[in-house]
Image: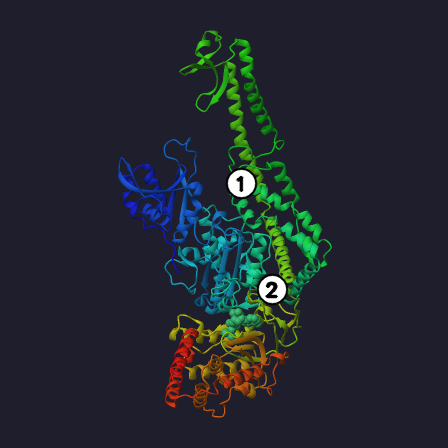
Amino acid sequence: MTAVTGLPPTMADRKDDVTPMLSQYVELCEQHPDALVLFQVGDFYEAFCEAAEEVARVCEVTLTQREDSTGEYPMAGIPIDNAASYLERLVEADYRVALADQVEDAEEASGLVDRAVTRVITPGTVVEDELLAAGSTTYVASVVERDAANGERDGYGIAAVDASTGECFVTTVPTRGDVREELDRIQPNELLVAGDAPTVAPDGDWMESAVDAELFEPTVARDRLAEYVADPDRRLDNDAEQRACGAVLAYAEYTQGDDGPLEYVSRIRRHDQRDQLRLDAAALRSLELFDNRGPGSGETVFDVLDETASALGRRCLDRWLRRPLVDRAAIEDRLDAVDALVDDGVVRSDLSDLLAEAYDLERLAGRVSRERANARDLRALHATLSIVPELKERIADIPALSDHHARLDELRDVATLIDEAISPEPPMELTEGGVIKQSFDDELDALRTTEQEGREWVADLEATERERTGIDSLSVGHNQVHGYYIEVTNPNLDQVPDDYTRRQTLKNAERFYTPELKEREDEIFGAAERADSLEYELFCEVRETVAAETDRIQALATTIAELDALCSFSIAATEGDYVRPELRAASDDAHISIHGGRHPVVETTQAEFVPNDTDLAGGDVAIITGPNMSGKSTYMRQVALICLLAQTGSFVPAEAATLPVLDRIFTRVGASDDIAGGQSTFMREMSELTEILHDATDRSLVLLDEVGRGTSTADGLAIAQATTEFIHDELDATTLFATHYHGLTDLADEREGVHNLHFAATREGDDVTFLHRVAPGASSASYGIEVARMAGVPTPVVDRARDVVATMTGDASDSSVADNATDAADSHPTSDNDTATDPAASAAAADDALADALAEQTLDPETVAAVAAELQALDIATMTPLEALNTLDSLRSQLDEE
Ligand code: ADP
């Protein structure tokens, strides 16, 4: 986490002995001590002195020396037309950038042009299209601890705003862990902290931004909120929420040039954690919903599901995946809609084609209301509005979409206004004409007619004057400096009539004007100039009228976004061969049953993905064993993802699924997968475990992957076992636990509802093959040795290793590997027991093959003992797979030297 900074205002000392322009710059820097000020000078944004050095360094532009009557100082500038990429660099270098624009026409200014900061660009409040990825969200957030001294309960208020779309929401959470969970879900780009007070928020990928602590003051915040909502005390739950929300809104206003409340923040939503399936940071990460940090294809669950056609839909899908539902009726509504679209391929593809024409209404509405929209933006708004009637028609006959149908507001008034007012292909600039359509405004039409007639008169002038004067080479032209002129070459000057007045002398010709030409010229330019500014005024009026409808535009945006997300679900379902999940009644226990389940991402990367069943009654614990890379994590994640997807209203990758509505998904991935390693990782692992042990309920799904590996084997096993017992006996949370601790599998014998599942491997020839099929029972007690055996380590070594393990675990009878692959007596929950690939049979076959191959071989007992001792000394739990392979290789070569 880095802090956003401004520039130390060391230039302040020099304010009085510099030129007026530099003094203006210094003053703006003083007004924005936390920002780097860029100062418009014509077509450039310039920075001076220390700021110039930073700009030159970060943007890699030339640092020049400017010299004036008061001395020399550094200066660096970036072209305004091309500012986006430079601004991005400055923001990435942790600067807030204040843009001081010329707010007065340079030609009209008497003396120094007036400048003002119109925009402060910060990581969390970017609104410029060039700096924003399509369909992304950019939040600035803040967290405030509830004031216990004030008699409040414990907890934290959290608020976030997206300055580009006006989305704003608040929530209150009870613990610090919840703060982290919520921030991980929001993924803000910037987090506000009050002055230099220590922050209550955890570390994260966001930038920390110090702001005036006053913004967080209860009265200040409440006054601010009152500008946005009628009754802040009723709308927001508590003081901490109000303070957090007031602060983010104040900051958003500041970054948009401090023009008062942001009109397009028209609604402040409250989230309640209880209204959504809760996912903590570890779940978001390890399920690879959005962010795939691991190696591999790089695809995320979001990528696989994202078939949205518009930026609006993309953002909606993102929100839905971050906040799956818990309200059965709401989930079923979405599922009904997806179902209907899955059934009707024609409507589905028509909708998708139509939605692809929708522009980003949320951001357009923001720009319109911030008075930043140009004529092209209004045209884009019109283009989007014009798909609405057809959208309505397409979904009119689908009962599951009747609510959306009713909500689709065609905004005919707005569409008609834009269409009547704005040219079909207007220029970017608003002040140079060409923006307003003909027949929209009588005065404008009259001005344009005057201009047009004048120009036609001038166009005819050449012919009339040639005829009048008899000078065939006479020509009429125009230039910027002198305006219209009649040009006569020197040989014909004697034929020039009396009413010509000389305007300009050239080498071979003279230029003249007549009183009438002058009069016409004034008329033409007067009308043109008046027309241009009238167009601008008319445009602003139209934009204001549209801005007054921001609420309706935002509501339409929401409806279109939802349609797109639903359509995306239906396309993903059709293409991925997903089924509609069935939800269990609230009164049922949290029984998860999945037939032929698949991992939505891994299945797209594998030539042949092996589907697996799951059948876990609520509160069951499945202990999953099997070698590395056999498919344990994939299986656990697929179960979680199928549950999660169902609760977002999506179909799921399975042949059939009957699922409970879960309240939370917890995942903990053990420290061995963590590169950092060491004691601190173990501590973290344990503290995360603590959270589960506090918070999991009989409606939660818990995934534990190799938990306990961050410490020595004996402690690890002890912790793993105690955890499992507690989750099972006390919490009754449905749990999948992948583990290397074979000792855990004994729990299945001791406790009802604890089952062993395993993933096995077979050997064919020299190849070790993973079946990726989950099967009942525990895997080999010593599957590390099993893999060593399959890799070709000679039998005597393997046997000796087994003895060693048996001694270590105090279980002398467990010396055989082949006979324990399935524990047939274990009452297991998985119905799929495919005998064709029975791992026990395969393992036995592999054993036989190995035995045959080694039958003739004799080995020196001393070497065998040495190798065995080395094997025994290995700390398998802390070895990387590569180290293990290298060690195996060296052990085998010791024997080969025999
Ligand atoms: P483990 O957790 O046992 O170490 P993983 O779940 O990480 O194993 O799986 C290892 C690899 O095996 C995956 O990256 C994937 O390529 C493949 N795999 C996993 N499950 C399946 C499956 N059901 N079908 C096909 N391939 C799979």
Tell me where residue 180 appears, x and y as whole percent: 47, 66
- Asked if residue 769 is positioned above or below residue 542 in the image, the reply reads below
Q: Residues within 10 Å of mark 1 (few under 14, many from 20)?
A: many
Of residues 823 and 217, the one drawn nearer to the viewer in this rendering: 823
- Asked if residue 265 is positioned above or below residue 754 in the image, the reply reads above
- Does ligand 1 reach within 8 Å of label 1's beta carbon? no
Residue 754 seen by the camera = no
Q: Residues within 10 Å of mark 2 (few under 14, many from 20)?
A: many
Q: Residue at x 43, y 38 (%)?
A: 103
Residue 691 seen by the camera = yes
Tell me where residue 741 appears, x and y as whole percent: 48, 82
Of residues 873 and 183, the one drawn nearer to the viewer in this rendering: 873
Of residues 606 and 239, the one drawn nearer to the viewer in this rendering: 606
Q: Which residue of the protein is positioned furthest toward the left in this rendering?
A: 71
Whichever of callouts 2 and 1 sits on the residue coming sooner in the sequence is 1
Q: Residue at x 49, y 49 (%)?
A: 127
- Asked if residue 789 is positioned above or below residue 522 in the image, the reply reads below
Q: Amino acid at mark 1?
A: Asn
- Does ligand 1 reach within 8 Å of label 2's beta carbon? no
Q: CA distance from mark 2 to mark 1?
A: 37 Å
Residue to which mark 1 is pinned: 374
Classify residue 696 as left or right of residue 103. right
Q: Which residue of the protein is positioned furthest toward the right in this rendering?
A: 397
Element at label 1:
loop
Tell me where residue 563 appears, x and y as whole percent: 64, 55
- Asked if residue 469 is positioned above or below residue 222 in the image, the reply reads above
Element at label 2:
helix
Residue to which mark 2 is pinned: 648
Q: Residue at x 28, y 37 (%)?
A: 67
- Quarter of the picture containing the N terminus is bottom left
- Quarter of the picture containing the C terminus is bottom left
Q: Amino acid at mark 2?
A: Thr
